[in-house]
Amino acid sequence: MIATRKPVIELRRLHRFFGRTKAVNDVSFEVYPGQVFGYIGPNGAGKTTSMRILATLDLPTAGDALIDGYSVINDPDRVRRRLGFMPDAFGVYSNVNCREYLDFFARSYGLRGRERRLAMDKTMEFTGLDVLAEKPISGLSKGMKQRLCLGRSMIHDPAVMILDEPAAGLDPRARIELREMIARLAKHGKTILVSSHILTELAEMCDVVGIIEQGQLLATGSVADIQRGQLTQSRVRVRVLENTEGLAQWLAEKEDYSEIVTDGQLLHFSHVGERAEEAVLLKEMIEAGFQVAEFGARHSTLEDVFLNVTKGRVQ
Amino acid sequence: MSTADVSPDATPSQAASPTSWWQTVDQKLESLGEYLNPILVKETRQALKSRQFAVTFALVLLTSWLWSLLAIYFRYPGILYSPDGPFLMVGYLDILLFPLVVIIPFSAFRSLASEREDGTFELLSISTLGPRQIILGKLVSSIVQMLVYLSALAPCLAFTYLLRGIDIITIAYVLICAFLASVLLSGVGLVLACVTRQRHWQSALSVIVILLFIFLFVIGLMISYGSIYEDAGWRQYDDVDFWIVTGALFSAYLSYLYLTIEVASAQITFESENRSAGIRRGILVQHFLLIGWFGYLAIRNPREEEILMVLMTMLCLHWFIMGSFINGESPVLSPRVKRTIPNLLADRIWRNWRLPGPDRGYFLVLTSLVSGLLVVSLLIWFNRFSTLSVGGAVNGIVYSAGLVGYTICYLSVGRLFLRLLNMIFRADIFVSVILHLILLMGGVMLPLGFQVLTNRTMDQNFHHWTNPFWFFVESIDSSSFTSQPLIGPFVIFLWVLGTMLFLVNLLLGTRDFLPKREDDPRFQPERLPAKIEDAADPLA
């Protein structure tokens, strides 16, 4: 995603203290139109608090947050009109079916007549709830309720969507479906801030991630950027037709390569650095006369990055 | 909407063009429904689909039929020629009172409480619906339910009229009273629903609320029996005064309903918004209503200074109760409220009373009390031109001034104590109300305790000066109390004390009294220091 326009979500030195607890401590980042920003961090890191401030449900202790250029402190009404918020709780009503539920929220956002009916139909079709329109909410599965809640948060066509742990408690199929829906929303120009504990999924759907711990933003950028910034470690596997021990010795003489283990024709080692260095290494191996039959590296995932960046501290 | 990959057939199907006038009416009504409060639409849908409504409605119908049959059976054959309308009416009204006084107000209470419990309230908060819209939607939904119950019993009520013994005005009057009581109780239910957010307190509160409504239902039963079956003396429809009193009571009712709506709305409004302005407006409306109606009565009956004394008593009670709440408000002005402060000094002074905060509220309470005293003094002066005696005028003035002096003293002492408490912990509205009650109790008990300890007789003397009830009872009991020589210096003493306490409070609150419109540097990231270690809670 090309980020040349003005940011749609902007956190400027955001602080939120609860007594001595610094739930959010000097957090700043920007999210540009059409980007999906993954907000990751352990429980109690400050994700939900920052999201609640963005959703105008709380005030910062200091700093500011802007949605589409409007401050959550000074222009909460304008922010609300541009924002769809999906909290981690479902928030559903009894004795109401799916259509009535969406109808209520469409009315609550001031949609009237044809505009409201059109918004409802499109939302139901998007979330796949059109076939369950008349079904009471109490009879819906968790996955379907989550779809309904996503539908509720997008019924007024907001520019920005904030999704707090949308995949929590869902089965794998429901998760995949949710992920696809988020990807489709981003494709249609929505700017999305999503938090989750399921990091592999965030890595797939997010353009940018921010890692937060103890209220502080530790790293922000694309997964690849963070990996580069972290000089992340990859585990390389090499198969040579002969002289495995010789290769091990050759490698041991070089810098940046460690944990060298041989196993017959196979050799494993760790490398801290950039991927391009591994390509150079392969070339050098061949030039040094080693008969390389297989060369592969398992690079660090978002999960590795997360574990590397965070320290598992809680407040 | 641009979010979905929507197929062309996703557009809503066009409604068929109307073929009959009824369909046209139906479509018009539907389009009218677009402009209804969304909460009303949702709540009505929910309520009419709920099992609780089905059961209650069925029970109301069943009991009313049963009552009809039983009443006819017991009164037969007398029912054929004697006016038995009131007898049946009491039964029908009692049946109706149960949903009106217990079920519907409790449903309103649960409806708002469950919004908080189920996490739907936050979703409403970030929609374009305002807190007042939410409260009004829930209240009007209760009214819809009331109308359904009333319409179900309409044939039975018509039956009582046919049986004679009760006229159509009485039936309408009683039903309107029951309906209005139900609306106000639903409003009270909504206020109580916001008292606490903690689940265990909510459960306890539910029990208290249902017991309260059942208690009121029992009182309602007694009133209905007394007013319809036993005593017909109050039905003076030909007397203008009856309708004037009805009008006065109705206006007082409306002011309390307004205040209830404002309080409930304030409780669900974000803490960072101005939650005081509406409530203060409601309190002032009640102040003016009291002055208006009692002033009118005083002018109509110029000889009776007691009317003005009752007015002053009610004003002092009104402002003492409201003042004890206002004194406990948070002194912190949120950045959102600060942004609403006008730039122009005159405008700022004029609108200052609407800003939240105990100092501004305390000043409003005191100025309102003094304005009430001025109005009463003017009315006494005006009535002196007609038939009010000098003794009556002195009695009225001294009593009013004394009572206002007491109220100012107690509220000022309360405000000073709260300042001290706020240095230790955040004393909220609940603490403030308790503190004012303790102060009042202290004022009453102190001389009584002294009397018991010293075994003295202190009746009718100034040893009781800390007790406002002593002053009240003595003044009402005998006009000679306010004409004795000591009373003048005593009232002056009260006023001097009150003024001093007021000045101390004013001095201590000067800094926060007239806030300016300013951008808080805390919310300007570029002006923040490199590292923030501590900062005040913006919602404290």
Image (cartoon, coloured by chain):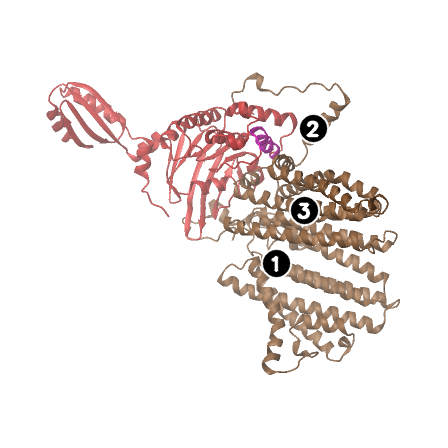
Residue B227 placement (x, y as % from top left): 78, 53
The answer to which of marks 1 and 3 sits earlier in the sequence is 3
Q: Chain of mark 3?
A: B
| Chain displayed in red | A
Q: Which residue carries the number 1 mark?
A: B325
Magenta region: which residues? A96-108
Instruction: For mark 2, give the secondary structure.
Output: helix
Q: Are marks 2 and 1 on the same chain?
A: yes
* Quadrant of the snapshot with the N terminus of chain A: top left
Q: Looking at the image, can residue A12 be seen?
A: no
Q: In front: B489, or A228?
A: B489
In this view, the mark in front (2 or 1)? 2
Q: In the rendered picture, chain B carries what hue? A: brown
Find out whether residue B310 is within the magenta segment.
Answer: no
Q: Chain of mark 2?
A: B
Q: CA distance from mark 2 to mark 1?
A: 44 Å
Q: Which image quadrant for residue B18?
A: top right
In this view, the mark in front (2 or 3)? 3
Q: CA distance from mark 1 to mark 3?
A: 32 Å
Q: Which image quadrant for residue B454?
A: bottom right
Q: Which residue carries the number 2 mark?
A: B30
Q: Which residue carries the number 3 mark?
A: B98
Instruction: For mark 1, give the secondary structure.
Output: helix
Q: In front: A213, or B153?
A: B153
Residue lying at the far top of the rendered structure: B8
In this view, the mark in front (1 or 3)? 3
Q: Amino acid at mark 2?
A: Glu
